[in-house]
């Protein structure tokens, strides 16, 4: 038992010490000198709010530099698919991962000291991993819900754009009108696409960035159809109308498919929970009478 507990405790202390060293050693000497030169002419006694913001920014900078590039890329992708929530920037996500990992280490140490066997280490390690990856799990869940909402909003949005184009507006003007009057995730994404075009990005790159940013296959297919229509000179009104009709048909087929799946999903709760109670109510009194009529019961 001691052969299991001692290495586990040593690993906990080594991991905590390494994490503390990575966080609180601070920036390199050259960077500290640059920061000192930049802050040299500031007020000598800043308020507590400014000091707190500076400490938070320094911690976020350390976390960004110490986080592996692959993990940063994965977090950035999940954050973008979740709609880039302002309340949860990447710096806050990294801070929450740090706090979750530290809390998991502490709880794992408590499990090891209480149980004093391999179970404590395994339970603590599982809880540490769950707390460390909890922000990414929440981002992934938010991204899935956002994609589902965009899928539902896309056919109606294309209908509105088709009506606007048929009324004489250009494609960008129709997109701007729909984005201004619409609500929801897709409208906000269209607003950002128009902003990208206004700051100098080409329309083709802005459209493909919209498809990559949302990660919705139907929207990506629509973007490719629009780009091909502009390339080969096809009327965008026809492209919008055909895409809207196809998406409405797919939405109808998806609803029918889900309706056909309901009996299959209901059969297991019926067999496990409803049928036993029904058998007890219907057959139970007869079984009791039979048992009473048999001698010896």
Image (cartoon, helix red, strand yellow):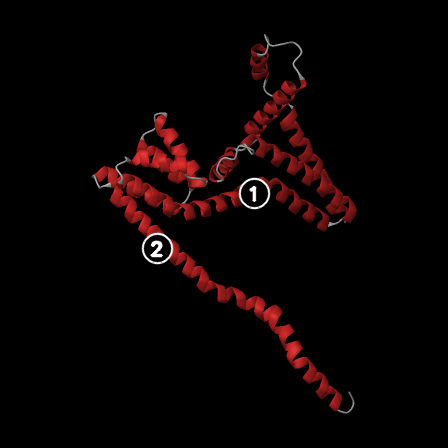
Could one spot residue 11 in this view of the protein? Answer: no
**From what the image shows, is residue 21 above or below residue 251?**
above
Q: Quadrant of residue 14?
A: top right
Q: Which residue is mark 1?
A: 138
Could one spot residue 166 in this view of the protein? Answer: yes
Say how many tags the image has: 2
- Under circle 1, the secondary element is helix
Q: Is residue 39 left or right of residue 110?
A: left
Q: Which residue is mark 2?
A: 249
Residue at the spot x=38%, y=40% of the render?
Answer: 211
Residue at the spot x=67%, y=19% of the render?
Answer: 48
Image spot of residue 6 (x, y percent): 75, 42
Q: Is residue 228 left or right of residue 126?
A: left
Of mark 2 and mark 1, the one earlier in the sequence is 1
Q: Residue furthest top?
A: 41
- Under circle 2, the secondary element is helix
Residue at the spot x=45%, y=62% of the render?
Answer: 259
Residue at the spot x=52%, y=35% of the render?
Answer: 85
Of badges 2 and 1, the one in the foreground is 2
């Amino acid at each position: 038992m001691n052969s299991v507990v001692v290495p586990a405790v040593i690993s906990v202390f080594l991991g905590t010490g390494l994490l503390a060293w990575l966080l609180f050693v601070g920036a390199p000497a050259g960077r500290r000198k640059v920061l000192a030169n930049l802050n040299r002419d500031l007020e000598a006694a800043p308020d507590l709010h400014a000091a707190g913001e500076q400490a938070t920014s320094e911690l976020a900078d350390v976390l960004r530099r110490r986080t592996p590039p692959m993990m940063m890329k994965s977090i950035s992708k999940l954050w973008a698919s979740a709609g880039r929530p302002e309340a949860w920037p990447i710096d806050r996500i990294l801070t929450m991962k740090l706090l979750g990992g530290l809390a998991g280490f502490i709880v794992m140490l408590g499990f090891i000291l209480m149980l004093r066997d391999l179970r404590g280490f395994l339970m603590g390690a599982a809880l540490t991993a769950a707390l460390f990856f909890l922000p990414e799990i929440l981002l992934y869940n938010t991204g899935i819900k956002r994609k589902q909402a965009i899928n539902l909003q896309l056919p109606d949005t294309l209908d509105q754009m088709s009506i606007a184009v048929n009324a004489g507006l250009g494609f960008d003007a129709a997109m701007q009108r729909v984005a201004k009057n619409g609500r929801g995730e897709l409208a906000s994404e269209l607003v950002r696409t128009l902003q990208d075009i206004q700051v100098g990005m080409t329309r083709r790159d802005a459209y493909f960035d919209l498809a990559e940013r949302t990660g919705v296959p139907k929207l990506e297919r629509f973007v490719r159809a629009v780009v091909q229509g502009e390339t080969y000179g096809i009327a965008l009104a026809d492209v919008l109308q055909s895409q809207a009709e196809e998406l409405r048909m797919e939405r109808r087929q998806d609803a029918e498919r889900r309706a056909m799946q309901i009996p299959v999903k209901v059969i297991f709760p019926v067999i496990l929970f409803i049928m036993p109670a029904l058998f007890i109510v219907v057959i139970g009194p007869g079984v009791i009478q039979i048992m009473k009529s048999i001698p010896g019961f």
